[in-house]
Image (cartoon, grey):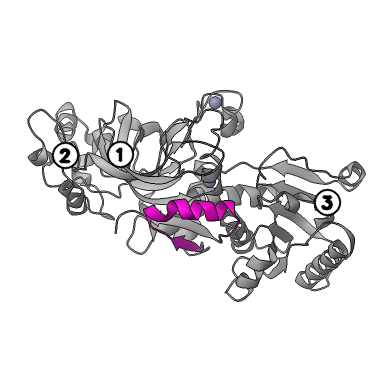
Amino acid sequence: MIATWTPRVSLGGHIAVHPFNSTMPPNGELKKSAAAAVQIQNTVEPDINLDKESLQYETNSSESMIAKLQERPGPPFPSTQRAILTPEMGENLNLVLRKIAVREPDHGEAVIQILYTGICRSDASSSVGPGSGYSKQNHIAGHEGIGRVVKSHDPFIIGRTFGIRYLGKSCGSCTYCIRDLFTSCPSQLNVPKHITGTFQEYATVPTGCLVPLPDAFLRADVDLAFCTAALCSGSTALVSVRAAKASLGDVVIVVGVAGAIGHLTGAIAKQVFGARVIGIDLKSKIDVLQSQDHSDYSDILLGAPKTDMGDAWSDFHSTLMQSCDKLRRNHGLRRAAEAVIVASSSFSSFQRLDEYVCDGGRIICVGVPKGNNNMCLPLHSVVERNLHVSGNLMGGHREALEVMEYIATGQIKPRITKVALEDIPEQMQHLVDCKTAGKIVTPFAS
Ligand SMILES: [Zn+2]
Ligand SMILES: [Zn+2]
C-alpha cells in the first residue's frame, strides 16, 4: 500500500498540527459538535503541502513512523451534515435538503469533506425510477466532486485532496478493463449508484475510488471550482474530440454547444486540437450565447432546425454548408464538416446526422435522450461515404486530469455557475427542462 503512494499523488492538504485527540473523548468517538465543522477551516490548510519531512515513507519509512502517523486521525468533523437526497424515488424529481449523519469509515474507506460538486444532467436521470442498481430510498446523487480526506484508517491520505467520479473503481483485469472499456467492467463501482454521491458535505467512500489530484492543481491561483468541470463533463468532452479525430483546421460541429459537455467539447476542439467549431443549440440558447464571448469554444453559432423536414431543414443545411465554407476560407472541395459531436440530450438532435459530415466523416454520439430511441442513418450513405459512427459514455481518470491541466494552465475556461447546496433541486429541474447553460457547480466551503 505504501509503495503505491508515489510523489505524483496530491499533497495538497496539510495534516493538522493541532492534535486531533484534543477533541476526542477517551472512547475514541469523535466529538459531535457543530463547532467542530468550523475547526476544519483552522486545522486543514489548503494549498500547503504535507509535512514532507515526516512523509519520507518511500525512502525512510519505518514501523515507528507509521505508528506515529496512525495516531493522527485527522481533523475533527461534525456528526451530522446537510445533504440533498431523494427520500423516495418515483417518476419525477423529488429532491429535498436533509440533515443526515456522517458515516464513520470502515477499513478501506475514507470520510471526504466535499469542497465542490458539479451537477450533471445524469444526476437527474439517476434520481428518478429507480434505475437498475440504484436504491429506492434516500438516494444521494452527485458524481463530480473534489474534496479533502478528514478521516481514514490509512493515515497517509488524511488531509489530501481528491476527485470523485462516476466510475469509482473497476477490476482492472477483465476483458473490458484491459481494453480500456472500464465502464463495461462487470465489477465496477459507481458514484452514486453503489457509493453515496457528492450532494452532501461529507461522503464516506472506498479509498480506491478516490482520484488523487496532482500538486500542480492545488495552488492559490487555480480555482478548483473550474477543475470540478473536468471530472465528468470535461473528460467526456476530451474523449469525444479524440474519437472525432479532429485535426488542425478541421471543421467540427458540436450539437448542444451551450451545455456543460458541449461548450467544453468546443473549447477542447478549438484550443487543444486546433479545429474550427460550429456550435449548434436551441435558438433561445444561441441568442444568449451570441451576446456573450464565445470565441474560445465556437467560431460560428447556429440555431438548431425546427424540424428535420422540408424548407426548415433545407435552410438550416444550406446555412451549415455556408458556415463550413466560411471556416475553410473557401479552400478545397466544398464539403460538410469532418465530424459532428452530439452532446445534446434531445432526440431531435440525432436526425440526419450523415448530412452534417463530409465523406469519411465521424458521427460521435454523447448525449442520451430519455426513452427508447433509434437513430436512423441511410446505409448507403454510411457505407459508400465511409462514415464512422461511435458512442462515448464518458472519459476516464486520465482524461479528467488532462482536462484539469488545460484548465489550470488557462488553455480552456469552463463556463461555470456557482449555486448553493439548497438550490440544487431547482437547478436539477432546470437541467431536465433544458434551461441551463455551461456547468453548474456547488462550492461547500468558503
Ligand atoms: Zn456527469
Ligand atoms: Zn474489469
- Would you place residue 272 above or below residue 173 in this image? below
Query: Magenta span covers which residues?
Result: 416-437
**Residue 45, image x, y percentages:** 23, 53
Which residue is located at x 46 percent, y 62 percent? 417
Quarter of the image where ligand 2 sits: top right
The residue positioned farthest toward the bottom in the image shown: 291
Q: CA distance from mark 3 to mark 1?
A: 50 Å
- Please indicate whether residue 249 sits to the left or right of residue 42 in the image: right
For label 2, the residue is: 32
Instruction: Give the distance between the C-alpha atoms of the residues marked 2 and 1, in whole angstroms.
Output: 13 Å
Tag 3 secondary structure: helix
On the question of residue 200 being in view, the answer is no
State whether residue 409 is above or below residue 229: below
Say which label, 3 or 2, has the lower sequence index: 2
Which image quadrant: the N terminus?
top left
Mark 1: amino acid: Ile
